[in-house]
Each structure stands twice: as structure tokens, then as C-alpha cells.
Image: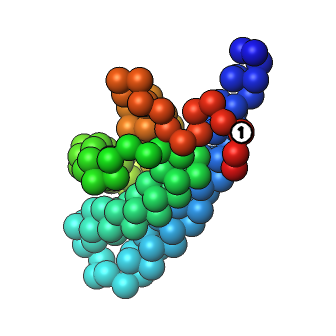
Amino acid sequence: MSGVKRDGKWLQFFKFLFFSLGAAVIDFGSFALLIWLLPNAKTYTVIAAVTSVALSCLFNFTLNRKYTFRSVNNIKLGMLMYGLFYLVLTPCMAQLILLQVHFGIPELLAKPVSMVVNFFCDYAFCRFVLFRPWGGKKTAGDGDSKG
């Protein structure tokens, strides 16, 4: 039985990975577009990073809530918690990009490094905090095999 539960966790991880790849396309695409559109100044990197992360977060939260974790918990509270998490994480990721740029790495090469760090932080937060069934409440995916 534990093998089945373990297989379910791997499936959940790969679903998260799949949706995160979609979010990464949105994140990197909007970041690259904003880098191209905004004037050449240090603040443009932060503006581009924050905007691109906000767009990808909306995509990622919506799909992972519905398909990966199948959460039936309070959507407004979940979005608030996710937003607060990214209120802390986004400046850290922007600083990671700026640090790399400071050492001569172009923004469009620095961004994927921050995206990988972001992926693991996001998965841990979603898996162990945001979509964890609290107080015995089940998510729609607990104990059933329906897709």
C-alpha cells in the first residue's frame, strides 16, 4: 500500500513539474518581453521580474490547485497565502537575478537560475503548506482514483 501512496506522490510531483514548465514559459516570455520593452536601467530588471512572476503565479496556482493537488479548500485564503509567500520570495528571486547581473551574467541567462530555485521553493510550499489537508479535511484527490 505504501508503494501506491509513494507512486501518487511522484505523479503529483510530475504534474506540478508539467504545470510549472507552462508557468516557466509565461514567466520567461513576459520577462524577456519586458526586458526588451523597458528602458535600460537597474529598476527595469526588478519590474520585469516581479511582473513576470505575478503572471506565472496566477497560472501555476490555478492549475495546480485544480489538477495537481485537487484542493477543495478556501480558494480566497489559498490565493492570499500564495500571494504572501510570493511577496517574500519574489524580492529574493529578483535579488538573485541582480546579483548574477552584477557579476556579468546577462539577465536572460540569470533568470533561469532563479526560476529553478523558485520551482523547488514553490513545490515545497504548495505540497507541505498551501495544499496540505488541514485538520483532517481532505482534498478531492485524497483516497480516490478519479482524474
| Residue sitting at x 32%, y 68% | 51
From what the image shows, is residue 124 above or below residue 15? Answer: above
Q: Position of residue 2 (x, y in %)?
A: 72, 15
What type is the residue that disc 1 sits on?
Ser
The residue that label 1 is drawn on is: 145
| Residue sitting at x 63%, y 30% | 143
98 with respect to 123 (left or right)? left
74 with respect to 16 (left or right)? left
| Residue sitting at x 32%, y 47% | 74
Residue that protrudes farthest toward the top in the picture? 2
**Front-most of residues 94 and 8:** 8
Q: Position of residue 69 (x, y in %)?
A: 54, 42
**Front-most of residues 17 and 107:** 17
Visible in this render: residue 20?
no
Residue that protrudes farthest toward the bottom in the picture? 37
Q: Residues within 10 Å of mark 1 (few under 14, many from 20)?
A: few
Q: Position of residue 124 (x, y in %)?
A: 46, 32
From what the image shows, is residue 74 above or below residue 57? Answer: above
From what the image shows, is residue 73 above or below residue 61? Answer: above
**Front-most of residues 8 and 103:** 8
Indicate the secondary structure of the residue bearing disc 1: loop
Q: The N terminus appears in which quarter of the rendering?
A: top right
